[in-house]
Structure formats: structure tokens, C-alpha cells
Amino acid sequence: MTPVPPIAAERLPELLRRMPKAELHIHIEGSLEPELIFEMARRNRVALPYASVEELRRAYAFTNLQSFLDIYYAGASVLITERDFHDMAWAYLQKARADNVLHAEIFFDPQTHTARGVAMETVLNGLHQACVRAQADLGLSASLILCFLRHLSEAEAFETLEAALPLRDKFIGVGLDSSEVGHPPEKFARVFARCRELGLHLVAHAGEEGPPAYVWTALDLLKVERIDHGVQSTKDAQLMRRLAQDRIPLTVCPLSNLKLCVFPALGQHNLRELLDAGLVATVNSDDPAYFGGYLNDNFTQTFAATGLSAQQAWQLAANSFEASFIGADAKRRYRDQLDAAFAAFA
Ligand code: ADE
Ligand code: ZN
């Protein structure tokens, strides 16, 4: 740990914005802003059940994960062409760069698109083109993680994997998302075992709304390397010790947790508890177009509400690079950039 001198509270938002960071939990379909949804609906002649951007935004009043997912899948129905997937990812990557994100690992949900007749190749080619462009034009490294929808069957997950394998060089790993409660990780144990044999990185959403037991089975049966969300883990002291000892990162998404009513207020979020227990916690945006903010909004609003310090800002940024799936050399370089940014700010 690099010791960070205290910084006046009024300078903390600027430090949070300026510090280099990685984003490890962003669903690219959740970055689709209402304006882009309407633009794509127009150019692809897709009918939307909302009359205007304003009406759509007014519908973003969620009570739990499922109430969000219903609207999120409807929004994704406008994505048809390779250009659409490129434009969506490119819009996110530009925003990420403006937030001083140096590296992003981006989730995508192919089944949301293949179920509507969009080819896997269309999805992956469009997203991958945007990632290549981000490296060339923005100096931002970005890679893709394919998520299986857990409310669908194991057989459908296997079919999705088969369809993606000819494009294996365009994604680095697999994840598990969608409706959590009632769809425990063990439903996908055989799919994840196959992905592990294929050398893919493994992550899973667990302990967002679901119980600590789902975090245990994601670790022990799916053998994931990171847990997405995982905030329910604080209810299980033995699990907290396991996460700390094995340095299993949690990709925490504070504004998502607030908007989906996982916590009643940002000031009651347990991020501090996770850090104090020595966990490799990170801050991420999840679905920024739906939850009212991109990565820096998550940092600044959470710090304002919980009173976290500059030392904890450094820790969260350092954790984001440690938890990423980049090589040891790149991790060292990013860590040096992080220390240089803090030294320049002090
Ligand atoms: N898909 C997009 N956002 C998600 C979330 N927060 N939890 C589960 N699935 C998701
Ligand atoms: Zn998520």
C-alpha cells in the first residue's frame, strides 16, 4: 500500500475524477442512453412502447433487479446491426476515457440479441471494433466478457458458448447475469467447467440480491476468479474471511445498489465494511445509462455519502488494476501511473 497524505474534503471529488482506474463491471447494453435508443429505433424501424426520450426516462423508477431487467431488455431490442453494437460501445468508451478509465472489461449479453435473430458475429464484431478503436484513438485498453443469462437454461448457455467459439479471440472470459434469486450458480456448473477447460476467465454475479450461499457456490462450484456485486457477503463472517484470504475481488456498483433498492440510501452502503475487512473491493457503474451515473459519478457520490478518505480512493483504484485480467507488467505500469497521479495531486 502506498501511504496517501490526508486531502481536504473539498478536493476529494477532483482527486477521484483525476485518478487512473479500471472498470470491471459494466454491461454494455446498460450504457445505451435513451437518446441512442430512440436514434437506433428510428434507423432500424423498431417500435418502442414509449413516445419520447422523456417518457422512457420517467420509466426508470426501479424497485428491485427484475423491475430494471424488464426495461433493460426492452431497450436492447433496438440493436440490430454491427454498427449499432459499435456505436453503443464507442459511446461508452469515450465516456470512460473522460473518467480516466485506462482499462475496461465489458460484459455483453449475446442471448438478448440472438433470441431476436441477430447473429453472434454481428454482436461480437461490432463490440470488438469499438474496443480496437479505443486502444488506437483513446489509449484505453478494453476487452469483452460474454455473460450467460441465468434465467435461461443450461442447454441455452451451452448453445451460446458453441455459437461464440468461432470468435474466441474476441472475448476473454464468461460471466453470469440477469435474475439472480431462484437461479443459483450451480445451474451452470457444467457450462463453467467447459469454459474453464477452454482457458476462459470466469466471473459471476452473486450476492447482489441473492444470499451469501450463492457467493459460496460461485466460488466452489463455478470456480470464478471475481464476484460481481457480492455485497450480501457481509452477512456471513466465514465467507468474508474466505474472500479476504483468497483475495477474491468484488466488483461493487454503488449507484446500481441504490437504484435497485439493495440499500435504502448510499450512506448505508457497506463499501467501507468491505474495505475494512481487507477485501479487494472495486467501484463500478453496472448499467450507467439506467442508474444515473458513469464511473466517476459512482466514486464521487459514494465518497460524499459515506465519508471515505483519499487513502481509500487510492486503495479502490489500486484494487481495480489488481483485480483486472491484464498481465503483471501492465498491472505494474498502471500502479505506477496511479502513484504518480496521487503524488502530483498532493
Ligand atoms: N444485467 C445488467 N445489469 C445487471 C445486474 N445489476 N444484475 C444482474 N444482471 C444484470
Ligand atoms: Zn451487473
Image: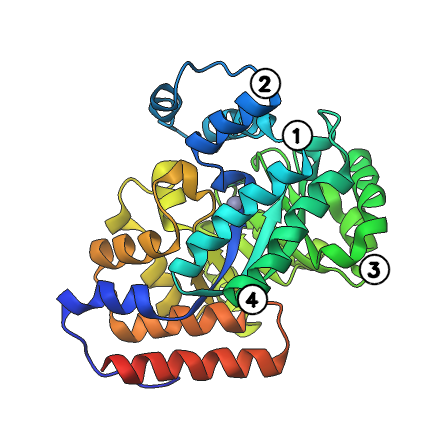
Q: Nearer the viewer, mark 3 or mark 2?
A: 2
Front residue of this view, candidates 271 and 95: 95
Mark 3 surroundings within 10 Å by alpha-carbon count, few (fewer than 14), some (14 through 19), many (20 or more) = few
Give the mark, 4 or 2, whose residue is nearer the N terminus. 2
Looking at the rendered structure, which numbered label has been put on residue 335?
none
State the CA–CA distance, disc 4 to disc 1: 36 Å
Q: Determine whether the beta carbon of the residue marked 3 sits less than 8 angstroms from the nearest atom of ligand 2.
A: no
> Residue visible at 26% across and 73% down?
310
Give the mark, 3 or 1, whose residue is nearer the N terminus. 1
Q: Give the residue pinned by disc 3.
A: 198
Looking at the rendered structure, which numbered label has been put on residue 46?
2
Give the mark, 3 or 2, whose residue is nearer the N terminus. 2
Give the mark, 1 or 2, whose residue is nearer the N terminus. 2
User: CB atoms at circles 4 and 2 under 8 Å apart?
Assistant: no
Residue 127 visible (yes or no):
yes
Q: Nearer the viewer, mark 3 or mark 4?
A: 3
State the CA–CA distance, disc 1 to disc 2: 9 Å
Mark 1 surroundings within 10 Å by alpha-carbon count, few (fewer than 14), some (14 through 19), many (20 or more) = many
The answer to whether residue 147 is left or right of residue 158 is left
Amino acid type, residue under disc 4 in the picture: Ile
> Residue visible at 63% across and 39% down?
83
Looking at the rendered structure, which numbered label has been put on residue 248?
4
Looking at the rendered structure, which numbered label has been put on residue 80?
1
SS state under label 4:
loop
SS state under label 2:
loop
Asked which quadrant contains residue 202, the reply is bottom right
Amino acid type, residue under disc 3 in the picture: Leu
User: CB atoms at circles 4 and 1 under 8 Å apart?
Assistant: no
